[in-house]
Amino acid sequence: TETEIQSVLETLNISSENNGASTGSDWLSTKGAKISSHSPVDGALIANVNAATVEDYEALIQSSQKAFKTWRLVPSPKRGEIVRQLGVKLRQYKEPLGKLVSYEMGKSYQEGLGEVQEMIDICDFAVGLSRQLNGSTLHSEREAHRMYDQYHPLGTVGIISAFNFPVAVWCWNTALAWICGDVCIWKPSEKTPITAIACQKIAAEVFAENNVPEGVSTLIIGDAEIGKLMTADRRVPLVSATGSTRMGKAVGEAVAKRLGKSLLELGGNNAIIISPSADLKLVLPGVVFGAVGTSGQRCTSTRRLIIHESIYDNVKSILVNAYKQIKIGNPLDENYHMGPLIDKDAVNTYLSAIEKVKAEGGKLLIEGTTLTGEGYESGCYVSPSIAEVENSFDIVQDETFAPLLYMIKYSGELDNAIALQNGVKQGLSSSIFTNNLREAELFLSQAGSDCGIANVNIGTSGAEIGGAFGGEKDTGGGRESGSDAWKVYMRRQTNTINYSTELPLAQGIKFDF
Ligand code: NAD
């Protein structure tokens, strides 16, 4: 694959040695620790990056603060036009960028392309939105007064992202933040720095063609320490952070300490309820894609199945049979269903989770292992697992970011299944397979799923960009992407205008002077 990686890097204008901080077209000469990005596909070195330092961070923030002063004055539809051009450029680079995502993160090429498609879609969404950043007109209680609210940009938006969606999360945030008039500083996962460099270069091409100043799109590569600079910095009014709940708690606390805003997109523990009336034809692909797609490394991956006892054994045999047919191998070869995990640490976490399931009394129906031999040289390939467990097991309560699927039995009415589904700390994605209207509506009602995403006859995994994306409880409460998620990137101002010749006070207060 090395020559293939080289040709992808060339198309994306990336060299083998890179700097880890950029204000747009300019790259600072960073002197931090060297990060070598190896592909989980076959262990090949993709490229090196020198991480950024505190000084580089400071330079980027200064550049972004300066850029904000001009960017906020550009009319929003004109900013939208630039984001439209970014969408066009992403269409041109879709294949090499999708391929690089596959090489660096290990997801299938189809999913890599899908991630770039999400970027394109959110750009298109943002273009329309740039003419719809509307506040409301309100009726004043005072005569000859007008009142309305309007939205203004916030300033520098900090974006901290996870390895598993190395490019889409950046665009979900930037496309909206930019049309809102904000400038962005992005700290990608240190596990996927090269895809981040690719994104920055693509944005820089568009920005240069439109004379957008340096500092509107800045990139800083480094570990959690760089992220912490951002969370503690009052010059970053909003930090949008995607990653584990552990990280989100640290980020949320640091940002709250200075009364900043945070948008948190954290871990999930997503369940599918399979009711007696479920159409099992739909269940099978929904569950298998949800559990083993992206090797179980999606925040919306299916972790738990909550199955009615009357159909439990049937679902079990169908699933176990299906798992035996899963082909694991090079994610760039479409004959395989499942690629590698991100790195060997992730493999170890997966294997130790399997041991914990056993120690707590769970039964492995299919026990995953590390794969060795031809095609598996990177040491990152595993086979998936299915285990019968109790929802209350400690290990089941946690998110294991790997293809480990739990089966849990429920009896009686749907309320019992909903209680199990909600009986975890996280609240991201959920779904029910049922043909019973009453069950579907109960699941979606205020007495139903407590998650940010609740689906009927669709799995938990993946979402369209048009809806607001995010979850409750330990998932962090943030919403990004579609619907009115843009509002978090802006500050609201209430305006009252007096066009009378008097000065009446609100609430009828008299003050004679
Ligand atoms: P991670 O928490 O290890 O790292 C995420 C990012 O946070 C990285 O860029 C890391 O450098 C940074 N970071 C870590 N500690 C920090 C701190 N104290 N201050 C500032 N920055 C810090 O997560 P990961 O392993 O890259 O990603 C997997 C996790 O992300 C899973 O839990 C998954 O569910 C979650 N995720 C959630 C969503 C969502 O939208 N809800 C989407 C994708 C991934």
Image (spheres, grey):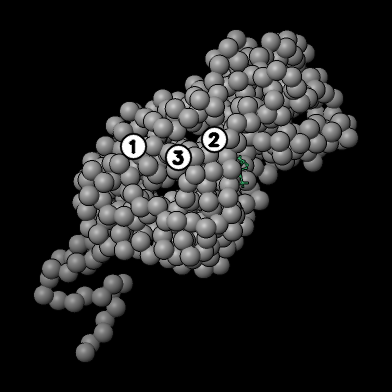
Percent across and percent down for residue 21 are 45, 53
Residue at 36%, 45% in the rendered image = 176
Percent across and percent down for residue 496 are 23, 66
User: Which label was assigned to residue 15?
Assistant: 3
Amino acid of disc 1: Cys
SS under mark 2: strand
Task: Report the front residue among 323 and 27.
Answer: 27
Q: Which residue is mark 1?
A: 123
Amino acid of disc 3: Ser
Look at the numbered discs 2 and 3 and tell me whether their residues touch, using CB distance below 8 Å: no
Residue at 63%, 48% in the rendered image = 245
Residue 209 picture quarter: top left
* In the displayed structure image, the side of residue 199 where residue 434 appears, left or right: right
Q: Which residue is mark 2?
A: 46
Compared to residue 512, the image places residue 131 above or below, namely above
Compared to residue 333, the image places residue 225 above or below, namely below
The crowding category of the residue bearing disc 3, from other C-alpha atoms within 10 Å (few below 14, some 14 to 19, many at least 20), is: some
User: Which label was assigned to residue 71?
Assistant: none
1 vs 3, front mark: 3
Percent across and percent down for residue 392 are 79, 38
SS under mark 3: loop
